[in-house]
Amino acid sequence: QKEVEQNSGPLSVPEGAIASLNCTYSDRGSQSFFWYRQYSGKSPELIMSIYSNGDKEDGRFTAQLNKASQYVSLLIRDSQPSDSATYLCAAPGGDDYKLSFGAGTTVTVRA
Amino acid sequence: DAGVTQSPTHLIKTRGQHVTLRCSPISGHKSVSWYQQVLGQGPQFIFQYYEKEERGRGNFPDRFSARQFPNYSSELNVNALLLGDSALYLCASSLWAGDTEAFFGQGTRLTVV
């Protein structure tokens, strides 16, 4: 079982819609979770960190964490063409503080 | 403030050669981690260094090595390059070894021919 898994993409949404991305993790001891945005040919950029159950909002982005179900999600409201990118979910894996990443979900926002 | 800086940004090497990649963390950050990202996959952990000590190592062969300097900058070395080593190599900076919030540099695109 992979440590972090993301629902398969790609995801295509019209401009102004909500994009919903999901991620599950295997380590019940994980305490922190991250969403990175990666534009094609670029490096990952940290856009959201979440540590507690519930929702965390930052602008048009909302991260949701459910530790009991071991899933974390990212909602992008009022999607813009500039949101077109691959979104990576990450969580600590093991006790050496590495981050384990999902394979990513590619989002395309149609104008 | 400067973010994480990596050099070079692009590199082309021949099979069997050796390569050194460099990284300077965010000012005040003492932990540096290295990741390899091949096309279509998420980054894979290679090493973490903190206070010049190796704190973690991923599932990579001994051809991969790294070190951290007193100024917290770091080098990743890969010997006897294989075609499969072609990837984006990412350096991540965090405050300390237990801080999982990591910020990435722009990466080094390595192509082995």
Image (spheres, grey):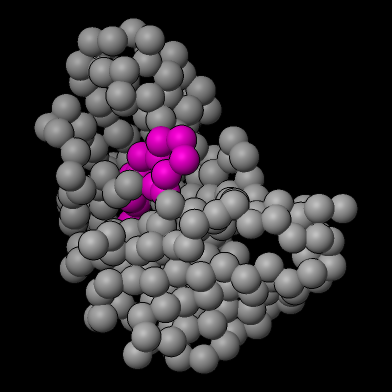
Most foreground residue, A20 or B56: A20
Task: Confirm whether residue A6 shows in the render.
Answer: yes
Number of numbered discs visible in the structure rendering: 0
From the viewer's side, name the closer residue of B86 and B106.
Answer: B86
Residue A10 pos. (x, y %) = 59, 52
With respect to residue A37, does A33 lie above or below?
Answer: below
Q: Is residue B42 magenta?
A: yes
Does the image show residue A45? no
Pick out the residue farthest to the right: A111
What residue do we see at 81% from left, 53% from top? A110
Residue A46 in magenta? Answer: no
Image coordinates for residue A78, horizontal then vertical, percent = 81, 71
Question: Quick check: A101 left or right of B63?
Answer: right
> Relative to A61, is B77 on the left or the right?
left
Q: Residue furthest left?
A: B62
Image coordinates of residue A59 in percent, x first then y, are 74, 76
Between A58 and A19, the residue placed more toward the observer is A19
Q: Residue at x 51, y 23 (%)?
A: B10
For the point 23% across and 37% down, which residue is it? B66
Q: Quadrant of the N terminus of chain A?
A: bottom left
Describe residue B2's horizontal placement relative to residue B38 as left or right.
right
Q: Is residue A29 above or below residue B111?
A: below
Q: Which residues are magenta?
A: B29-43
Q: Position of residue B60 (x, y in %)?
A: 19, 38
Q: Quadrant of residue A68?
A: bottom left
Up/down of A105 relative to B101, above or below: above
Q: Which is more toward the observer, B99 or A79?
A: A79
